[in-house]
Image (spheres, coloured by chain):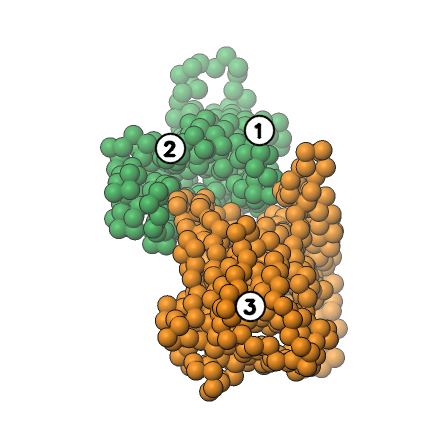
Chain colours: A green, B orange
Amino acid sequence: MTALAPREASRARTASTAGATLQAEWTKARTAPGTFWLLLAGAGLTVALGLLADAATRCQAAACAIDPAKTALIGVYLGQAVIVIAGVSAIGGEYGNRMILTTLTATPRRSIVLLAKAVILAGLVAVTGVVAVGGSLLAGRLILPGHGIGPARGLPPLSLGDDAVLRAAIGTVLYLVLIALLSLGTAATTRDTATATGTVLALLYLFPIIAAVAGAQAGRHVQQVGPMTAGLAIQATIGLRDLPIGPWAGLGVLAAWAAGALIAGAASLRSRDA
Amino acid sequence: MSTTTRTRPATARGLDDSFRALVRAEWTKFRTVRGWVIGMLIAALVTVVIVLLDHSSCGIVTPNGAPVGCSATIGPAGEAVTDDFYFAAQPLTGNGSLTARLTALTGQPSLGSWAKGGIIMKASTRPGSAYAAIMLTGTQGVRMQYDYTGDIAAPGKTAQAGSVSAATPLWLRLVRSGDSVTGYESADGTAWTTVGTVTLAGLPGTIQAGLFATSPGTSRITSESITGTSSSGGIAYATAVLDHVSLASSQPAGPWRGVAVGRPGPGTGFRHSGGRFAVTGSGDIAPGSPNDGGTPVERTLFGAVAGLITLIVVAVMFMTAEYRRGLLRVSLAASPRRGRLLAAKALVIGSVSFAAALAGGLASVPLGEWLLRSNGNFILPASGLTQARVIVGTAAILAIAALFALALGAIMRSTAGAITTAIVTTVLPYLLATTMVLPAGAGDWLLALTPAAGFAIQQSQTAYPQVIASYTPGNGYYPLAPWAGFAVLCGYAIAAFALALVLLRRRDA
């Protein structure tokens, strides 16, 4: 492959480059030590925190406004942190050990490298998310009705047959994928694992803190723009009118953050020396 | 720097020369990386920035547009208290005693657990003045309470509200002698049991002695949600019926006068006929609680957790940067004793983190208090020692959490992994528990078991068993005592350092 691909290179060639890059990124992800264990830990921690919340939540009052889906899926607050590691390491690791030089020599079209990384990462995290959400919902379904949180109190059953629960389940998987992409884009922008990890975790965890101090009105706006506070609106199955932002609109806010980070990452990759 | 290993034992004077040189080397590494220094500045600044975003307000705006802020009754020790009750009283000059026979304690709409009725001696009728009282409670038996925070249960098996009647009455007596007041109870008015003797410093010569009743409001949880519980509360009344009232004093007894202390609510008062008194009151005589709407001082340090994220990033990088491009080999060639290298790093990052966090705290507390007060909030009083513990303690937990992160960096050697582990074990549990994402029970577990337990050092107000209130992390009440929580965090840091030391010695650089 020549270092300077002519602008008028054929579509077929671009496609084969993309295919080969995708293959290369898949091989890297597959063979990197710890990828499997990291993703397994992400799913495991999600289910574990969900179990803790299921076990600790009880509803004695007649009017019970505890959202069963949200309670069962609360582990995402923790599990997403592991997904952040996976997302940041997907490119941050290459900057750490200078592998990025080899990668960019093999695929000089830098946006394609980032795109290929994004596709592989999204696929892996989606699988992780399905496992995490499936396990969490199963645990919630087994525990929560016994604690007074279930159809007996007029709450939606934790079944994928329920439209709202299905939306929460699919949305949570998408949420984790978008968190991974936000992390990847941030790492490509900062080119430093530590800064990227700190930045993404601060973006996720600081908005609720600011919202808590900002008062009711301003706090609502803060929750509408925060990637986690807006994105997790997708988990709500009851009290939708009281949400700071609608479920899909909230996930859209997170998608905008992820897209912004990826575009910034692509721009950074193209414009700077590796 | 000399690489000969000297075996001179560390003297009691502390640091020897080679360790001093090592610390200087680590300090040079730290201060010459611009990003790390900026990170520390951000950590200090972000605490202040978050307190500036605090827009919580309290109080009402009067019809003519003038805002009236919240306030609180202040007790004899300078703390916020509740002091609302009704009593039939008369002055008592000098030493003396008050005895009465209680024949019923009832409540409307129901008798609350801490509804109370009995006899009281109080410095004045001003809310918040010193007092001692002996009483029957709704479900907590006979108790002697004094100066709001003091609560002594009568020894042995005592009378209960349900079993007290004209046939099985409860005799109560308070005896004043100088500054001390002793409470007695009896089933028959002849054989008296001492419940307690308390000293009320500076009790004036003439005090008010009387028969009182009060009851905290009912609170029934009507709805629970993940963001909290909503309860419908209502005003509740307690009525105490007493007879055989005798005031023994050097002065002739005067008429009984009804006095409403604080805001005992509408419909309170007393009836007196043929030596029989029925006193009805509402409210509580108790320490302040989160129900009262005051703001604890640590609210101004809420931003510290944001600074912690930055401190963790810098602390982890300070360690893991050694593993990149083989810097550690150079460091270890210069200082072959690996434990000392780790100690020097800890000393540098711990001191710098503490200084940054303390600077942030010292700036945000006065700034936050001023901002909160100007929005009508009432800052709950705390002693100087408590405030110092809150501010310095917050800087200390941030520094120790940074050391924990440094050790995690040495253990995991992965920057992203160590930063994430440190943040999800310190910041996330605090966030989940205080912003009410988790139900209170689960939040309490997290704040007792994880390194985030250290945040307990920030608690400036005390939880009292004699008040039913929502003592939750969100309201600033932690499951562990301040220093116990601090010890949990220190335990994690020490364990992480021990593991880091073992691994650093065993592994190749």
Q: Which residue is mark 1?
A: A264
Quarter of the image holding residue A246?
top left
Tell if the residue under mark 1 belongs to the same chain as the one under mark 2.
yes
Mark 1 or mark 2: whose residue is earlier in sequence: 2
Residue at 71% from the left image edge and 52% from the top image edge: B365
| Mark 2 crowdedness (10 Å alpha carbons): few <14, some 14-19, many ≥20 | many
State if disc 2 and disc 3 touch (CB < 8 Å): no
Residue at 65% from the left image edge and 57% from the top image edge: B73
Residue B222's place in the image compared with B79, above or below, is above
Between B221 and B7, which is closer to the camera in this rendering? B221
Residue B101 visible in the displayed image:
yes
Q: Which residue is mark 3?
A: B211
Percent x, y for residue B172? 51, 77
Residue B39's place in the image compared with B338, above or below, is above
| Chain at tag 2 | A
Between B314 and B426, which is closer to the camera in this rendering? B426
